[in-house]
Image (cartoon, rainbow, N blue to C red):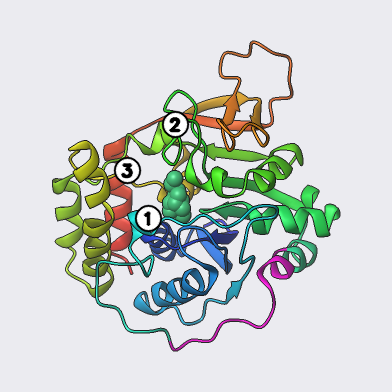
Amino acid sequence: MAEPRKIIIDTDPGQDDAAAIMLAFGSREELEVLGITTVAGNVPLSLTSRNARIICELCDRRDIKVFAGADRPIARKLVTAEHVHGKTGLDGPELAEPTMALQAQHGVDFIVETLRNEPEGSVTLCTLGPLTNVAMAFQKAPDVVGRVRELVMMGGGFFEGGNITPAAEFNIYVDPEAADIVFRSGVPIVMMPLDVTHQLLTKKDRVQRMADIGTPPAIAMVEMLQFFERFDVEKYGSDGGPLHDPTTVAYLLKPELFQGRECNVEIETKSELTVGMTVVDWWHVTDRKRNAKVMRNVDADGFFALLTERFARI
Ligand code: RIB
Ligand code: CA
């Protein structure tokens, strides 16, 4: 058995973030979570940092170190998404307040220090929220960019458009300057946009199979998803809501579930109309650098089978 892949999860929990973290926790043979860094996004930093620890304790992983990172975007006011995730960001199940402590070190410093201390090319960054922490780490310590094995991020959209404005997906919209820094940095990027995540609806039969696991983490996850999906069900009449963030961890576990290609991606940071848009040169009509592996298709049934199988291991 190969050594588990070392990852840092950067996150703004969020029910779908919780699913991603739980997928990682259910895959201990393949993934070693070096730490979780939290960022302001779906809800303010104090709540994302609370929620990350709740998820760790729910999964009996008090060994995981959680570091609070940036409490606001690099150059803008924070925009949050309580309308989707509820006032706590983790609405749905009744969950106790966390008792495990936050680490004293800032999340950005943890990212820098870990990349410097671990062997070059051995650490993967798995980002589930705005890219503020990663961009700040790259700005503070440009030497660490080349030490990253891969950055697998949920964010952006192209043929699918946006979910917070007609042009922009939430994670990019919250901190477009951070996304611009990261996409220009040269770090190897795998991008999971709305084009993929909108194919992954939490349909009733899929959620029922998670409920059938019957363990406290699985039941709590089902209650999170039932809360999280109501926004899309009420707005679009869909059978469930799109499960965004676990696509990143699923890619690390089973990349064959996904199809995409190397493209140039640039971030709009100026226009009021389209700020936060990920401009993807999918048809390669320019000779701009192909700086990201952009995913466009996914085996949805295979994805949910993986989630259910791994949730059952927690
Ligand atoms: O647009 C979806 C993304 O925004 C997900 O990461 C969700 O958790 C929110 O952060
Ligand atoms: Ca998220």
Q: Which mark is residue 79?
A: none
Whether pointer 1 and pointer 2 mark residues with C-beta atoms closer than 8 Å, the reply is no
Whether pointer 1 and pointer 3 mark residues with C-beta atoms closer than 8 Å, the reply is no
> Can you give x and y, in whole percent of width and height, for residue 273 in the image?
55, 30
Q: Residues within 10 Å of mark 2 (few under 14, many from 20)?
A: few
- Residue at far top of view: 285
Q: Secondary structure at mark 1?
A: helix
> Can you give x and y, in whole percent of width and height, for residue 191 in the image?
55, 38
Q: Which residue is mark 1?
A: 16
Residue at point 78%, 67% (across, down): 117
Q: Nearer the viewer, residue 249 or 95?
A: 95
What amino acid is found at the position of numbered circle 1 in the picture? Asp
Q: Earlier in the sequence, mark 1 or mark 3?
A: 1
Residue at point 20%, 44% (across, down): 233
Q: Which mark is residue 166?
A: 2
What amino acid is found at the position of numbered circle 3 in the picture? Pro
Residues drawn in magenta = 99-111
Q: Which residue is mark 3?
A: 242
Quadrant containing the C terminus in the rendered view? bottom left
Q: Is mark 1 within 8 Å of ligand 1?
A: yes
Cα distance, mark 1 to mark 2? 21 Å
